[in-house]
Image: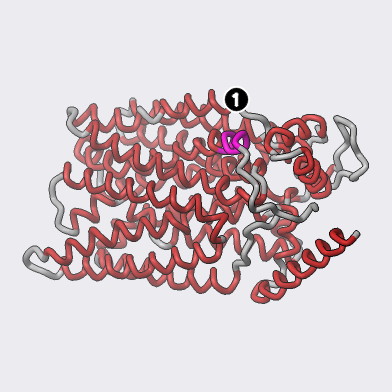
Amino acid sequence: MAGSVDKAAKTNKYALACSILASMTSILLGYDIGVMSGAIIYIQKDLKITDVQTEVVMGILNLYSLIGSAAAGRTSDWIGRRYTIVFAGVIFFAGALLMGFATNYAFLMAGRFVAGVGVGFAMMIAPVYAAEVSPPASRGLFTSLPEVFINIGILLGYVSNVAFSGLPLDIGWRLMLGIGAVPSVIIALGVLAMPESPRWLVMQGRLGDAKKVLGKISNSPEEASVRLIEIKEAAGIPEGSHDDVVPVPKRNHGEGVWRELLISPTPAVRHILLCAVGIHFFQQASGIDSVVLYSPVIFEKAGIKSDSDKLLATVAVGFTKTIFILVATFLLDRVGRRPMVLSSMGGMIVSIMCLATGLTVIDHADHKIMWAIALCTASIMFYVAFFSIGMGPIAWVYSSETFPLRLRAQGCSMGVALNRCISALISMTFITLYKGITIGGAFYLYGAISIVAWLFFFTLLPETQGKTLEEMESLFGTFFRWRTTLRELNERKAEKSMIEMTS
């Protein structure tokens, strides 16, 4: 049955391996986030940069990544998902080397530009590829893998900070940044061993190649056949077309996609776009990058003064994020998207309000208050844990699985672009913000934004667990009345199933 999902089906190991390889590109962004949080301590001392220059160098990579994410949608439709991932690795490799050999602030900014473009490509294409090779029953696991590798990258960046912090000032931070070139080479070479996305192959009319790939990433020939029929229907290819190479309707090569997304979208596409853009906006506007990028600053404000102690504390943050993102990957396809995102954001609200309270108490005290220091430390750990168990992976899962095939690459690139833009805004204003309204006030502000986010998710985000990628359009379009639509969709599926059983 085309619309069914066998939740008891075993995870296809070949498809999982392909998704892991593609998702490893996300290490590049994670490593940069993690390593910059500690490297900036030594960059400030070595290059004598101001607070404004610090904010810019910390957050500018996110703005530069807009170029990559904007270009990645069309590039991936043109050369394929696989070679786009290789291209991302090559660009980041060049950027990491430039940062590692930087002799001044301008040289460092040039490296940030090149690396940022590579990160933009990687962040858009990894979740798209993972969604397109994954069966519906395992899609939450597969499409959460990019977020897993972001967290692994952050942890590696934190560990790199500790490992090279004992070197001479002018060498340590350069090695921290330059060593990031190594994983990009490994990733680019590894990706060459995986197949192209079957959905991209169908979009090119290469049905023979798509059948071969689907045979490998499906659990049975029947499942492969059903998936091919669904993809062909979504791509506008007649069901009776069985040649290895067939003509594809012109619209599927990218013409009119932006018009359909932005100028004259259907109610379903408008609802999908609102949800995908909204979840990416609130993922970053909740302040996660301020916590992750500026962990040493926050720990210093909380009373930890030694550079080495601050770096070790950030390693604990990275370890906590990584452990809980691994937990999240195994819950996504069991619990569902909505319960996890709502509980995640709820926990983040409580944690960040406690952090703001602790920092405010410390800020107004004239002596060490141990309970406030402990509250701040625990709140940071709980905050990143709650983020990782829901908001972290689900933003990528949700946006990559909801867009129709014909709009997926460009739709996801829009989500990634907004994600990076808000991340840049948060990370490039944090020092100015906390100096203007106090550090406690900054986190109270993030907490207020998080409350708005929880209300947005509760009212507008339908549950997508177990739905095929081709069923998504029928689930969206009624906005606040999506629960009624979901109930009607489930009733139709049940009636169809009963008819097939009795026929």
Amino acid on which the number 1 mark rests in the picture: Leu
Give the percent coordinates (x, y) of residue 26.
48, 40
Q: Residue at x 41, y 37 (%)?
A: 112
Give the colour scheme shown.
Answer: secondary structure
Q: Which quadrant: the C terminus?
A: bottom right
Residue that badge 1 annotates: 192
Q: Left or right: where does residue 198 sit relative to residue 178?
A: right
How packed mark 1 is, by other alpha carbons closer than 10 Å (few <14, some 14-19, many 20 or more), is some
Q: Is residue 82 above or below residue 358?
A: above
Instruction: Say whether residue 346 is left or right of residue 122.
Output: left
Q: Quadrant of residue 217?
A: top right
Towards the viewer: 421 or 123: 123
* Looking at the image, residue 228 lies above or below residue 360: above
Queried whether the magenta region covers residue 459, the answer comes back as: no
Q: Main secondary structure of the magenta part?
A: helix
**For residue 194, above or below residue 477:** above
Secondary structure category for the residue under label 1: loop
- Residue under the point 56% across and 61% down: 336
> Extreme front residue here?
502
Residue 2 screen position, x and y as percent: 79, 52
Residue in view at x 27 percent, y 42 percent: 38
Q: Which is more toward the observer, 396 or 12?
A: 12
Boundaries of the magenta span: 13-19
